[in-house]
Image (spheres, rainbow, N blue to C red):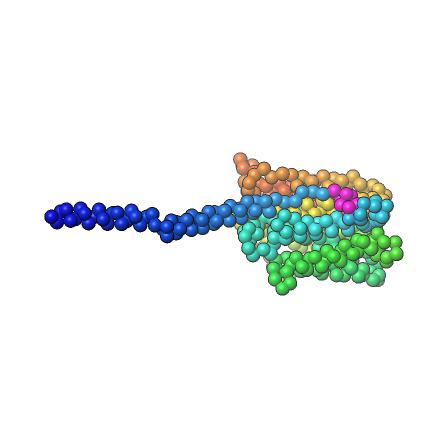
């Protein structure tokens, strides 16, 4: 009898368990779990896809077409300096309004985990800062005793605001103020009744090129350090009376951290992108100066070298091969283009300084 009771009891228990599986409450619980899983998976995929889309660096733009568009299509209003200023305005528009907007100060995904585009943005920002400073101190002034332009005194410090500040005030809000002032200066250039000026002189262009050669020289050194190398100390070379504040070793070994190799690469790519457009605009606004110095070809050579820095990257990551090995070293290739461009910049600046 106990045997039959056990079987009957177990069958009843099994029936209860099977019946419980088909209760509506259990199906609702499982449905909620599935729905939650699908939502989480969808959000993760969306963030990844959005991150890939935002990581695409902007393409080149035509500086002449950008100037014509900014002036409302009337080419007759384009005056010396308008194309150069319009190119800087377009660069600022690009870092602020490209897909994803300004990413260097993002604190939420996908922007928070992207580092290539923020470094690219900083490279562009360096050129914008140099240009607004040169516009304020040189291009817009006839001599050292002349008064600074009212708009450029606003634009210059605004673009030097912290590039990673996200709150109170945010970086974007400060840069937009600088962009507004820069646009005001650009518009006043095209207004015959305005006092805004742009002086396309050889000495002014020389001042800007002195910024450029320092930027390119620094970038080339940082990119070259992607592989370990030994460097001799040449800090005081050429002047036997020169001194420095702290002593330095005669030979140092430098190598960029593995985590910073792609950062340096994309910063260089961003700066050369911005510089390329600035020099294309310079070729238009300083055409008479360059022709008089027979320097048009020299500037075109710099532009060609910089265009090579914007070639498509076919690898999904920045490679860091060694020497003459099987794997490419993208940093050294970029350093090669930049070094050649820098050498041409130095030659051009010396040519402009000749009487």
Q: Nearer the viewer, residue 331 or 148?
A: 148
Seen in the picture, residue 61 relative to 210 is either above or below; the reply is above
> Can you see residue 73?
yes
> Can you see residue 280?
no
Q: Main secondary structure of the magenta part?
A: helix
Q: Most extreme residue toward the left, as rendered?
A: 1
Left or right: where 165 falls relative to 194: left
Q: Which stretch did the figure color magenta? A: 62-69
Q: Is residue 92 magenta?
A: no
* Rendering coords of residue 332 (x, y %): 60, 42
Residue drawn at x 80%, y 41% is 296
Q: Is residue 66 magenta?
A: yes
- Would you identify the image quadrant in which residue 66 lies? top right
* Rendering coords of residue 303 (x, y %): 73, 41
Residue drawn at x 21%, y 48% is 10
* Rendering coords of residue 241 (x, y %): 70, 58
Q: Most extreme residue toward the right, as rendered?
A: 193
Left or right: where 271 falls relative to 36: right
Residue drawn at x 32%, y 48% is 21
Residue drawn at x 29%, y 47% is 18
Q: Most extreme residue toward the bottom, as rendered?
A: 168
Left or right: where 153 falls relative to 45: right
Count the marks. 0
Q: Nearer the viewer, residue 31 or 5?
A: 5
Q: Nearer the viewer, residue 219 or 185?
A: 185
* Rendering coords of residue 100 (x, y %): 61, 50
């Amino acid at each position: 009898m106990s045997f039959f009771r056990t079987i009957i009891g177990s069958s009843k228990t099994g029936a209860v368990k099977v019946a419980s599986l088909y209760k509506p409450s259990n199906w609702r619980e499982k449905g909620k779990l599935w729905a939650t899983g699908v939502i989480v998976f969808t959000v993760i995929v969306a963030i990844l896809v959005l991150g890939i889309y935002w990581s695409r660096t902007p393409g080149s733009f035509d500086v002449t077409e950008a100037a014509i568009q900014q002036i409302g299509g009337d080419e007759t209003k384009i005056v010396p300096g308008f194309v150069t200023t319009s190119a800087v305005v377009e660069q600022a528009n690009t870092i602020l309004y490209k897909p994803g907007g300004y990413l260097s100060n993002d604190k939420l995904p996908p922007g928070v985990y992207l580092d290539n585009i923020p470094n690219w943005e900083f490279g562009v920002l360096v050129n914008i800062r140099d240009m607004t400073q040169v516009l304020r101190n040189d291009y817009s002034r006839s001599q050292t005793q002349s008064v600074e332009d009212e708009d450029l005194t606003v634009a210059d410090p605004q673009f030097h605001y912290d590039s990673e500040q996200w709150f109170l005030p945010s970086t974007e809000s400060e840069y937009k103020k600088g962009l507004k002032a820069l646009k005001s200066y650009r518009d006043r250039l095209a207004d015959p009744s305005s006092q805004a000026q742009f002086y396309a002189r050889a000495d002014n262009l020389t001042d800007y090129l002195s910024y450029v050669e320092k930027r390119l020289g620094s970038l080339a050194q940082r990119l070259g350090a992607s592989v370990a190398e030994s460097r001799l100390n040449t800090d005081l070379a050429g002047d036997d009376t020169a001194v420095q504040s702290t002593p330095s070793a005669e030979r140092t070994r430098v190598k960029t951290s593995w985590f910073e190799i792609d950062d340096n690469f994309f910063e260089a790519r961003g700066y050369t992108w911005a510089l390329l457009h600035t020099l294309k605009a310079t070729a238009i606004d300083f055409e008479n100066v360059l022709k008089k110095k027979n320097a048009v070809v020299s500037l075109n050579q710099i532009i060609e070298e910089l265009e090579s820095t914007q070639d498509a990257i076919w690898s999904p990551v920045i490679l860091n091969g060694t020497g003459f090995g099987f794997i490419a070293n993208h940093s050294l290739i970029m350093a090669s283009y930049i070094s050649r461009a820098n050498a041409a910049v130095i030659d051009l600046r010396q040519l402009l300084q000749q009487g």
